[in-house]
Amino acid sequence: SGGGGGSKVEQALARRHVASSGERLRLLLQKESVDGDIVAVYSNLAFENMTRNLICHMRSLGMHRFLILALDQELCTQLVDVGCSCFFDERFGEGFSEHEKWTFELKSNYFRLLQLKMSYVQQIVENGYNVLLSDADSVYLSNPHDFITKLLAADGGIPDMYIQSDVRPAVVESHTWVCAGNFYLRATTAARRFVAEVVRIMHETGFPDQDAFQLVLTSHGQEVPFSDHVRFESAASIGFRYRLLDPLLFPNGGLYFMLRYPQKHGVEPVLIHANQNWEKQKKLTRAGLWRLSDTRRCIDAPLHAAAADDGDFAGGADKNT
């Protein structure tokens, strides 16, 4: 992705006999690191065009050092023409290339896909890097890394994590909900313990990462009915500190495309997440946020939503991601 890292790293990455997936990841982290931070996007083949669209946004903002965390090997193969760093952990076999629908089903492919995602997060922080992770169905209107760097400085370097809100305004209990699709996690001791606890809860219960995040952070899940017998370490007991990002600046799909909260408040978001929507490309296109041509090349496009879809957003159980 045009980043630095030195010729030795480039030569090592070019060799076919890199010892292991773990070693290859370490080399890519070294190559793409910006002052100890990794900007990363997780995606699979089903979201290839979404990934390309986000890359177009990133490069238009001068963001050229980032890492694609692939959930299947084929995505990396397909993105060769983009010229960006892409990593797939071969220890997960062929990975998961299909669009897996959100489900409560224990040990589903959706759950296994999320296990791979969290494995990536865990490996990055265990290697000593902070990570700004985005879901592929996000778009950037300004550089979120720059924004969070300034926010962290203003907060005195205290929070271990900044995370997107997944609020549904009509659902009172959702006002504390987090979105595990977009967050900045620092490689602190508390953060390592937090990730390990999320991974453990997922393994023992079979429930998604977002609900495991929520359980540790606020002692309750979201729409997953955690048993009272599920044991967990809370964020407070771990000493893990976090902040919800402003939902006007980091809106979820319901707030932006349906309720149009940022537009009504005259706020230009930093990041928009097209979750809670099935017709993602259609909505992004109508909002002037689709920057990929029919030939899959980046094009100049208005970054402001001319007419995002109207519609009522009651905030039900739809967790299309």
Image: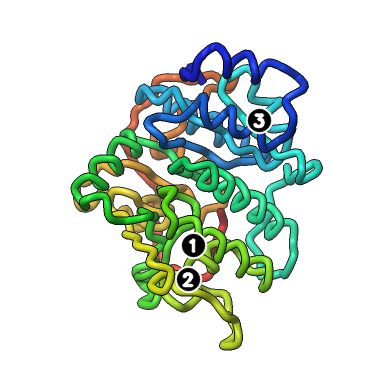
Q: Which of 41 and 313 lies nearest the eye of the viewer?
A: 41
Q: Secondary structure at mark 1?
A: helix
User: What amino acid is labelled 3 in the image?
Assistant: Arg
Q: Which residue is mark 2?
A: 216
Residue identified by numbered label 1: 194
Q: Is residue 98 left or right of residue 7?
A: right
The residue sitting at the bottom extreme is 228
Q: Quadrant of residue 191?
A: bottom left
Considering only vertical position in the picture, is 294 above or below 95? above
Q: Are marks 1 and 3 in contact (CB under 8 Å)?
A: no
Residue drawn at 44 percent across, 56 percent down: 189
The answer to which of marks 3 and 2 sits earlier in the sequence is 3
Q: Amino acid at mark 2?
A: Val
Asked if the residues shown at circle 2 and circle 1 are in contact, with their CB atoms under 8 angstroms apart, the answer is yes
Residue closer to the observer: 153 or 168: 153
Q: Residue at x 66, y 57 (%)?
A: 101
Tell me if residue 261 can be seen: no
Between disc 2 and disc 1, the foreground one is 1
Q: Which residue is mark 3?
A: 24
Q: CA distance from mark 3 to mark 2?
A: 31 Å
Label 1, residues with CA under 10 Å away: few <14, some 14-19, many ≥20:
many
